[in-house]
Amino acid sequence: MLLLVTGACAAPAQAKQVTLRLGAYSGLRERVSSFYEERVRLTLPDRGWVPIGYESRTWIDGRCHVDLFAQARAARDRGLERTHHVRRFTLPDRLSDHRVVYLVVDPDKHCAPGTAQPILRGAVLDGRRPACGAIGQTVLGNELVRVYDQGPWRKACARRSRHRTDLGFNPQSEVCYVDGCFIDHVQLVKGLVAYADESGGREGSSSSVVVVDALTGRTVLDQQAGRTCADTDYQAGPVESLVLRADGAVAWIVQDCSVYPPPTPYEVRTPAGVVAAGTDIVPASLQLAGDTITWAQGGVMKSAPF
């Protein structure tokens, strides 16, 4: 789980200040979440230079190169502690899945002995997080939660704790190009966020309905949105409309497995199963009225208990 870093600049007291941004990565360095709001701040001697980097930064002082990066992990890693020059911090966000933060300072063979220790000793964890409304473009919001887009990510922020939950990539992102992966049809009721998680490409597809408690980051529901199409790696989808009730109950309309020739078949579903099916269902017509869902089918409005 590796992190990205931001700018370096000269500062008083003959020092360079470098700020490392935190984000969670898998063991293969594959991005699995967006950046955290917390930072690790370093003080370097005021010599050499720190070029702009992507997943790490390097302090270059003559022939000496020192790699600087951070790692956010779910638990303490004694192997990392034995094999690297590290300093360990703990994120103040008790709801985070990756609270253990490692600062790694890795000098190469051309550096003098003891190069890493002063940098590690002077490092500090800045655990401050901006208010939920400070960054990004709002998608939905209420008094408890704000859902917003920041870069390619769609996120939910609990206003009181300022805890962020990554929901997935927003529909405008091109992260999975030429295939597609995004979340859509986001619904917010009190502290609950529901959405459709879609992935589709040349070798397969998936479509899921997810409900998250944004106040804690806990996943309440993660269920395949439709059936698996016969003898393929493709699933029915995408979800065309979705409704959420305050107790976490959800219903949705999903495009069924493709048939030829058209028209396209659709299903009205809840977590319990199929409520209605047919090529005459209007895909965007699903609505919630108390304990009843309604949709348009065959030119009339139909309903079912929720």
Image: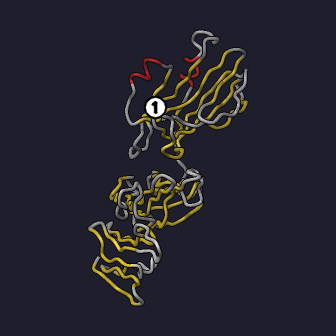
In the image, farthest residue toward the bottom: 300
User: Left of 36 or right of it: where is 192?
Assistant: left
Q: Position of residue 48 (x, y in %)?
A: 73, 21
- Is 102 positioned to the left or the right of 62 in the image? left
Residue at the image point whose x is 36% and y is 56% from the top: 231
Q: How many marks?
A: 1
Q: Quadrant of residue 283?
A: bottom left
The quarter holding residue 255 reads bottom left
Q: Is residue 156 above or below residue 112?
A: below
Q: Residue at x 57, y 24 (%)?
A: 122
Category of crowding for the residue at label 1, using alpha-carbon neighbours closer than 10 angstroms: few (below 14), some (14–19), many (at least 20) = some
**Image x and y of residue 210, in percent:** 38, 60
Colour scheme of the rendered structure: secondary structure
Give coordinates of residue 303: x percent, y percent: 32, 84
Task: In this rendered view, identify the residue nearer to me: 249 or 100.
Answer: 249
Residue 243 visible in the current orientation: no
Q: Which residue is mark 1?
A: 89
Q: Residue at x 38, y 58 (%)?
A: 212
Q: Is residue 177 above or below residue 90?
A: below
Q: Considering only vertical position in the picture, is 287 above or below 173? A: below
Asked which secondary structure carries label 1, the reply is: strand
Q: Position of residue 42 (x, y in %)?
A: 60, 29
Say which quadrant the C terminus sits in. bottom left
Name which residue type carries label 1.
Phe
Farthest top residue in view: 113
Residue 94 visible from this viewpoint: yes
Depth check, front residue: 169 or 105? 169
**Nearer to us in this view, 16 or 234:** 234
